[in-house]
Amino acid sequence: MQFKEALKRVHRHIDDHFKEHLKQVQEYVRQPSISADGTGIHETAEMTKGFIEKLGGTAKTVPTDGWPVVYGELSSGAEKTLLIYGMYDVQPVEEEAGMWIVPPFDGKIVSTEPFGKCLVNRGAYNTKGPLRAFFNACQSILEMGGKLPVNLIFVIEGEEELGSIHLPQFVKKCQKELAKADAMFFSDAAQDMKGKVIMELGVKGIIYLDLICQGGKWGGPTKRGIHSSAAAWVDSPVWRLLWALTSMKSSDGKIVVKDFYENVTPPSPEEEELLKRLEKTFDEKTVLEEMDVLCFSDDLHGIEALKRYLYSPTINLDGIWAGHIGAGTKTVLPHVANAKVDIRLVPHMGTEETLQKFKNHLKKHGFADIKVVVHDCYPWSHVSVKEKVVQAMIQAYRAHGHEPEIWPWMGGSAPFYLFNQPPLSLPYVVGGLGHAGRAHSPNEYFVVEGIRDNEKSVATFLYEYAYGKEE
Amino acid sequence: MQFKEALKRVHRHIDDHFKEHLKQVQEYVRQPSISADGTGIHETAEMTKGFIEKLGGTAKTVPTDGWPVVYGELSSGAEKTLLIYGMYDVQPVEEEAGMWIVPPFDGKIVSTEPFGKCLVNRGAYNTKGPLRAFFNACQSILEMGGKLPVNLIFVIEGEEELGSIHLPQFVKKCQKELAKADAMFFSDAAQDMKGKVIMELGVKGIIYLDLICQGGKWGGPTKRGIHSSAAAWVDSPVWRLLWALTSMKSSDGKIVVKDFYENVTPPSPEEEELLKRLEKTFDEKTVLEEMDVLCFSDDLHGIEALKRYLYSPTINLDGIWAGHIGAGTKTVLPHVANAKVDIRLVPHMGTEETLQKFKNHLKKHGFADIKVVVHDCYPWSHVSVKEKVVQAMIQAYRAHGHEPEIWPWMGGSAPFYLFNQPPLSLPYVVGGLGHAGRAHSPNEYFVVEGIRDNEKSVATFLYEYAYGKEE
């Protein structure tokens, strides 16, 4: 029980220095790092490298064919080594103009109902806020005890929001170094708006692609939008794209791409067990409220809603555009129409296999001319609740008075397969206390007191992982 | 034959002063007048009013609930009075950024193949170029002969590109003044890229509307885009809009809104006669080339293509947008999706009746929540080839060595019904020599030598209308 005394001192240190810690978080999120257009990417990579060096580690920015990965090592001669996988990039903000209550990169603290003070900024939640809080926690451990309970390896990438396109390059290159790790950790703010801790053990796979339909041999204007009076005898790339899309998903929500659901598998016995427990505490009202949504698809409830969420693949339209956009009227027959599509994969759907089915569908339905540009494409991954690193996080939550609600999967995607699947085969956990919200939305936030709790909880997690007894 | 001598002197005057005339056209088109957002509208109205005063007429800007109408009178004690209906507004340019070879309001003269020198500017063709050329022609007549062969009434509106929303207000208000007119004239550049003169006797009706689909009681995010992982259990306003749209028009191009074609009527005997003649000279290759289109819908040719063009109603998608637009990837489930739709009406489809069928369709198919915002809505109109004002234009073309190709209808729309239908019941004609192109597109142009021919031809038309013998 010796480590619990050390931990108490660390928690006190976090309390005593929280003002400075909060400033560090604000400073980090204020630095834009939009991977979609490159804004502030290199500045943020350097800043992140500096955080590792400040802890006494060694760090470098490793170039890839895209944005660099920040790689670092911090050895404390401990028995175990934890790989800290993180991201320093954030989502774009441009189409949210006018919807932010404060500018998205001002790092403002805003009083809001019902959470009190919140840090409102792009990346406050997803995920520069939790990442910087992790560094703060390490700083407090070092300042109190002299060394960390585990060795750390840092892999902080700048392309997570682009689908981690070049992270495989990096992992391949640095495989030997990464193999020293025993488990992987991804920093998060895991409490919902009611304070309940949510823990998710699996991530879905994702394929993100653009569809581009332009006039050509099949018809339509080939080079420019033309006067819409021509629509009586000239075909439209916009209608064509809409017909292609709606041929894939019927208005009852079913995906009708041939064999799309072929390899989808039902929950495993361990997952069925977790689902039974989850059902008891699942608070659908809060989940809906957090999303500003009035009802689930098909007005589902309880276990049915959960199963739909966790075990359904999706074809989502992230964006679509063509022709005249905005105010007023312009009578034009556009020459090109664009859609941005993400496909989420559940077990055991394969990425290449699914992409092929998608492309075959276009071909079979006469839309072979529609261009498919794949941005990213990676598989799902999953960890057992029995893994030591997962149990350490559960113990940490309990030490702070929280019984986590465990979800066998999450709806989102992350490239954990790179660490979780062979050759590295690392178990992993995602977590940390605190409530934050509106990822990928205007007014993304992290509750200020949640940042404090987050720092304390990740310190506890590190000690639990190093010294804690398994249940 | 006296007037033909006067006309020769006018033509010579145009030649001698063409350099200044061209400058006048450049100056006019350089002044932006984008009715969609109001850019330069008032400046252009004042400028246009000045043109009428410069000719010795009286003019005023008449306020409406939208942009003002420039109204003017210029009496020469002639027997006949011509109502000059025109527009001083132009289409927006924003989504054409980067596609113009010169800035869209620089009034640049550019040498292009195969036309030689062209004025390249928004509005050069549609229709500030031809309108200013008409003023130039009048100026030359006045400077040579002292008075015009007809009295003129000017109605130059600033909302044509918005569907002439408030022109009915104006026409109602000034009905007494307008009733003095014997016919209406609309200035155009009527030669195709091969030099053939095209004359169109009818215009289609139009309904322009926005469709807005937002999350609500039916499902979907209600206030903001949310993380796209939610797409597994939250409905999408984007998919919903696409399903609504594709429920109206099937992938074979047929409009499947109930009774949509109900009142569509076949060509009249006079029109059948015109079609037979038109078929002989119809140059489909040039028509396609002018639009940068490789084939007509369903690979139609000849009379079949013509009939489809002239007698088919359309539902065109002028624009569509939702969610993340542009570069990179953003995984978002958007809360709102928008479409801009124009419906073209052929005889004898009614505007209100058609709009009602459209709305009923949405309701019947479960899309009653999709908001319909009507921007403009007006009926078709038509004139007989036998009308004196039409014959005067035909004679003018012949006097300049051109036999016009007469089309019973055009694909586009114009609010001629305001003058053509009771109580005014004016016959009308649209015309003028010269080739111009790319209306509503980047690099809109008017061939410089065509401007000269245009001025001469409209002078001829005025004399033919005043003094010419009917065939």
Image (cartoon, coloured by chain):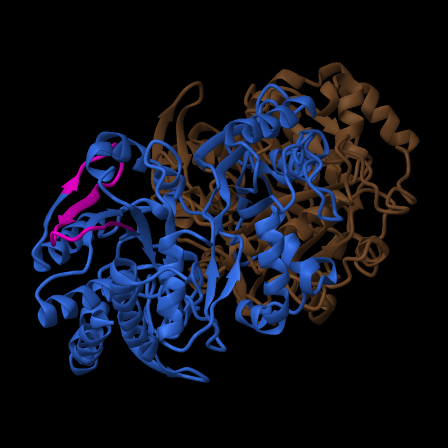
Chain colours: A blue, B brown
Q: Is residue A71 magenta?
A: yes
Indicate the quadrant where residue A69 lies.
top left
Near-viewer residue (A347 or B457): A347
Q: Is residue B117 visible?
A: yes
Image quadrant holding the C terminus of chain B, namely top right
Quadrant containing the N terminus of chain B is: top right
Q: Position of residue B391 (x, y in %)?
A: 75, 34
In terms of depth relative to the viewer, which is nearer, B33 or A343? Answer: A343
Q: Residue A300: image x %, image y %?
A: 72, 61
The structure residue drawn at horizontal position 60% and vertical position 64%, both measured from the top left corner, is A277
Residue interval drawn in magenta: A61-85
Position of B166 relative to B288 (above/below): below
Residue displayed at 57% across by 21% down: B289
Near-viewer residue (B112 or A120): A120
- Residue B44 rendering spot, x and y as whole percentages: 45, 59
B453 over A471 or under it: above or below: above
Indicate left or right for A302 with A194 as reference: right
Residue occupying image coordinates x 71% and y 25%: B297
Answer whether residue B452 is visible to the viewer in this image. no
Which sits in the foreground, B80 or A353?
Answer: A353
Image position of B298 with respect to A61: above or below? above
Answer with left or right where residue A182 lies relative to residue A229.
left
Is residue B227 found inside the magenta-colored segment of the image? no
**Could you tell me residue A67's position as x and y percent?**
25, 41
In this rendering, position of residue B222 left or right of residue A442: right
